[in-house]
Image: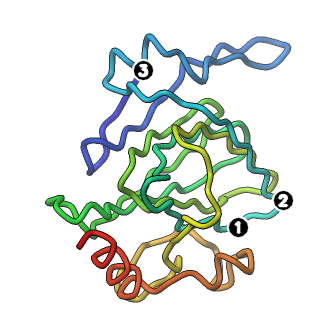
Amino acid sequence: MIVKTIMNDVLVIKSDVFKDSRGYFFELYNQKVFTKNGIKNNFIQDNLSFSKKRNTIRGLHYQKPPFEQSKLISLVSGAIQDVFIDIRLNSKNFGKHGSAILDQPGDSIYIPQGYLHGFCTLTEDTIVKYKVDNFYNAESESGVLWNDKDLLVDWNILNENPILSEKDSKLLSWANFIKDLEFKNV
């Protein structure tokens, strides 16, 4: 089942999960099904993220042109709050954000190019797999601080001290990110 979010091009995908006494099985990706639902990306790289602790935030990340990435984020175990922010300068949703809770194995979310993306783990031992349609490029990496005062993202964290990487704790403010984005598009 595919559900549209507040941004019509960001889609939540609920997989059919087949359970029995051994455990469960689900299909994370089926090109035919995704193409039928408008997701026609040529995914070229798979990534896996394991977070030991609840309240781990990864993001908000972005790859600058020409290395922008569409992502298909899939929950393997645990639970996350996935957050996305439209950064397409000509979009009617520019600067707006949304989120989705992925809390069942096989839950996925499709984030097209033109969005900041991040997630917060809601449980311990969370595993997230994601496909991208462009290779990672360290020089093109950018992002915005998770708690930027201008964005007012309502994260589902249980305390005021989430676990961040050193890199994520030094991301740009929304205002500086926008200045950089506008400069690149002149």
- Which residue shows up at 37% across the image and 80% down it? 180
Q: Earlier in the sequence, mark 2 or mark 3?
A: 3
Vertical relation: 177 (above or below) 118 = below
Q: Looking at the picture, how far across and down is residue 169, in whole percent?
A: 65, 83
Q: Which secondary structure lies at badge 2?
A: loop
Residue at 27% x, 60% y is 88
Which residue is disc 2 drawn over? Answer: 52
The amino acid type, in three-letter code, at marker 1 is: Thr
Which numbered mark, 3 or 1, is in the foreground of this view?
Answer: 3
Q: Residues within 10 Å of mark 3 (few under 14, many from 20)?
A: some
Residue wearing tag 1: 56
Percent x, y for residue 36? 33, 15
Give the left or right position of residue 114, taking residue 173 as reference.
Answer: left
Does the residue at mark 2 contact the one at mark 1 (Cβ under 8 Å)?
yes
**How many residues crowd around disc 1 within 10 Å: few (fewer than 14), some, or many (20 or more)?**
many
In the image, taking residue 122 as reference, residue 82 lies left or right, namely left
Residue bearing the label numbered 3:
34
In which quadrant of the rendered view does residue 166 lie? bottom right
Task: Look at the image and tell me in which quarter the C terminus lies.
Answer: bottom left
